[in-house]
Structure formats: C-alpha cells, structure tokens
Amino acid sequence: MSEENIELKRLQWECRRGMLELDVLFKPFLDEAYPQLDAADQARFRNLLKCEDPDLFSWFMNYNTPQDPDHARMVRMILDRVQPH
C-alpha cells in the first residue's frame, strides 16, 4: 500500500467522529473535495480533525466561530459545500 493510500485511510478513520452531524460533513468532504485542495488547505483540514468534537459541533452549527483563522477557513469551506449561498 502506498504512503498516499495509508494517509487517506488514516484520514478516513479520523473523519469518523462521535457525532453523526460531524460524520456527515467530514466524510463527503474528504471523498469529494479534499483531493482537489492545495497542500495548504489539505494541511488545514488535517489540523481541523485534531479539534475536539464539542468545539467542531459548535462551529458547524454556527453557535461559535473558531479563533484560529485556519480552522475558520475550513469550517466555512465545508459549510459552503452543504449550504450554498
């Protein structure tokens, strides 16, 4: 198995969260959008996956905004895919 495939499998595992609301956002984003992202945004997404579920839930439900601008960028990017303007 290539290093790229191993990384993708690891990310698929990390996209499985404790909350269904997050699973339905992360998994399609990983499958459909992540491969087309530039290296910087791919790194931002991997970093976002390190956040705690309660924080992620709060951000994706628009209860709070991430303080980290990279996190805010990725939350907006993911939400824009499911909530077109």
Image (cartoon, rainbow, N blue to C red):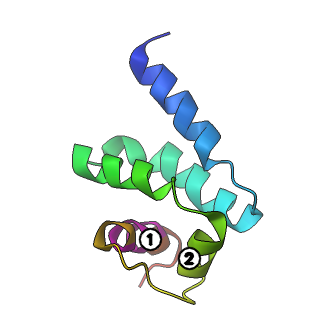
Q: Quadrant of residue 61?
A: bottom right
Tell me, for residue 46, which label it has, or none.
none
Q: Quadrant of residue 54?
A: bottom right
Instruction: Assess whether residue 85 is covered by the magenta stretch.
Output: no
Task: Locate the C terminus by quadrant.
Answer: bottom left
- Helix, strand or loop at mark 1: helix
What residue is disc 2 on?
60
Task: Give the percent coordinates (x, y) of residue 50.
Answer: 51, 53
Residue contact between numbered discs 2 and 1, judged by CB atoms under 8 Å: yes
Which residue is more in the foreground, 43 or 51?
A: 51
The answer for how far apart the CA atoms under marks 2 and 1 are is 7 Å
Where residue 66 appears, as percent x and y from the top left, is 42, 78
Query: Percent from the top left, x then y, of residue 7?
Result: 46, 28
Q: Residues within 10 Å of mark 2 (few under 14, many from 20)?
A: many
Q: Which residue is mark 1?
A: 75
N-term-proximal mark, 2 vs 1: 2
Amino acid at dot 1: Val
Q: Is residue 73 left or right of residue 9?
A: left
**Residue under the point 57% across and 90% down:** 63
Instruction: Give the residue at the far bottom of this rendering.
Output: 63
Q: Indicate the quadrant where residue 75 lies.
A: bottom left
What residue do we see at 54% from left, 87% from top?
62
- In the image, taking residue 64 as reference, residue 21 lies left or right, namely right
Residue name at image x 56 percent, y 29 percent = 9
Foreground: 35 or 57? 57
The picture places residue 3, in percent across and down from the top left corner, at: 41, 17
Q: Which residues are magenta?
A: 72-78
Instruction: Report the magenta stretch's main SS.
Output: helix
Look at label 2 and name its amino acid: Phe
In what element is the residue under mark 2?
A: helix
Task: Please tell me whether residue 8 is drawn above or below residue 33 in the rendered image.
Answer: above
Residue at 34%, 47% in the rendered image: 42
